[in-house]
Amino acid sequence: MTESTLRTVLLRGGAVYSPADPFATAMLVEGEHVAWVGSDGAAEAYAATADEIVELDGALVTPAFVDAHVHATATGLALTGLDLTGTPSLAAALAAVTAFVDAQGADGVLIGHGWDETAWPEGRPPTLAELDAAARGAALYLSRTDVHSALATTALRTLTEGLTERPGHDAEGPLTKDAHHAVRRTALAHLTPGQRRHAQAATLARAAELGIGALHECAGPEISSEQDLTALLALAAEGEGPEVFGYWGELGAADTARRLGAVGAGGDLFVDGALGSHTACLHTPYTDADHTGTAYLSAEQIADHVAACTEAGLQAGFHAIGDAAVDAVIEGVRAAGERVGADRVRALRHRVEHAEALDDKSIAAFAELGLTASVQPAFDAAWGGPDGMYVQRLGAERAAALNPYAALLRAGVPLAFGSDAPVTPLDPWGTVRAAAFHRTLEHRISVRAAFTAHTRGGWRAIGRDQDGVLVPGAVASYAIWAADELVVQAPDSRVAGWSTDPRSGTPGLPDLTPGHDLPVCLRTVVRGRTVHQR
């Protein structure tokens, strides 16, 4: 029996975010589960027998967050190594590469992440010669911010068999498509087990510091490896950090997903690429390129995969960003339903990761087919707005239609929020803020709805509808926050945006108006076990 199953913990003197009692100030935890939620006065009855009493001193207690789309090893490598996110120029990026190589040494394969040429005054990535010079001849892999293209030095290219014959190869510039996947596999294959564990542990520790109690790892042969996923699941099972639920993104590989311990055969099973790398698949060409992106899977292949997963009783899922890719998923899922039964398909809540380019017809289809939209609001915060990358790639009209969270909720499509770290950082309150203050006004949702998508939504996405809320009998995975005044924020500026009136009976959350400080995590508890304490 573990320590958590023996202990009784009473939290009192704060605010407990619970549908069981909108005015709750105290909570009792017995072992791995919430036993009671209520007032400080009523909590006195439990004080004498509690093993631990936590005096909240006004702090807020909420369910722990769930990040529904991460890449733990890549995130940890960015946290502990070369992260070019936010680098202001090409020259600064090259200088950072040189400093990193000088600090690490040029032996083995070095890995970095995060460059984004759209924000640089030079307006371009480095040439191969510039990269080789900055890296002092080292074998270096540098993923673009969206991880759908990468820079690779000559030394790394030489290590990658058959690279020049693969689609997406460029002798001088960034690699895309299969050429990118090949150099990524080469780079990650040179990680030692110790380096991998160090990176994964860094990600789990950072997530715990941010009040994240569970992660959905999106693994697959094009993004990581079988060894990477099984090592992560084993590390998480040690119980020192957040829970991890794995997805394996390989076509027709339901048996492999089960063998690896994954909860689904999906995640980053690529139907297309990304807008920033010009590989998201569109119906109409890019505004700044004379093509429509890349299609990795056909509707027929999608249908075969969904049908096989449904027959196996396993959730399927796909990465789809562009409107043509999203439509291929819809066509394929619908065809699978005709083959094995629409109700059986709907029951498994197959997932679509990212699902950025949606219109009313595709949103209605998501609702009809029971699809879960696993989305990343920080994408809009990073690349939306009139001067953002989305407008550069698509023009203002198409860019403004991206990431329509309000329309998805109105249609009854379940949302699960994530970061796609390291594409955007682990930042749960920032993610909630990004959805509530979407750069396109009509796509905004309430803070409460966004918070639900980032907590309960992640649990519902893996079929655990009872989790992600603080009610008696629920799993005791929660976070304690230092936060200012709690409010109820609505998304529409035409009405009163917030209220502190207790008569509403709606539990409050921190004020996330841009410019306000985000809450600070004081303690994170996963299944009754403390995994972070500030």
Image: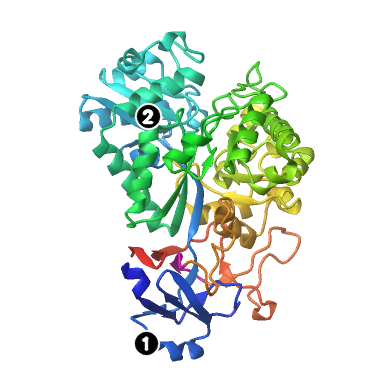
Query: At numbered mark 1, what does the secondary structure look like: helix, strand or loop?
Result: loop
**Residue placed under numbered mark 2 in the picture:** 93
Q: Residue at x 36, y 51 (%)?
A: 236
Q: Residues within 10 Å of mark 2 (few under 14, many from 20)?
A: many
Image location of residue 198, percent across then percent down: 28, 43
Quarter that holds the N terminus: bottom left
Between 163 and 89, the residue placed more toward the observer is: 163
The reply to whether residue 404 is visible in this rendering is no
What's the residue at 41%, 22% (across, down)?
Answer: 151
Amino acid marked by disc 2 = Ala
Q: Which residues are magenta?
A: 476-484
| Horizontal side of residue 440 vs 209, given as left or right | right
293 drawn magenta: no
Query: Picture coordinates of residue 433 (x, y %)?
Result: 57, 55
Indicate left or right for 221 with 132 as reference. Answer: right
Q: Which quadrant of the structure image shows residue 491?
A: bottom right
Residue 477, magenta (yes or no): yes
Question: Does residue 180 show up?
Answer: yes
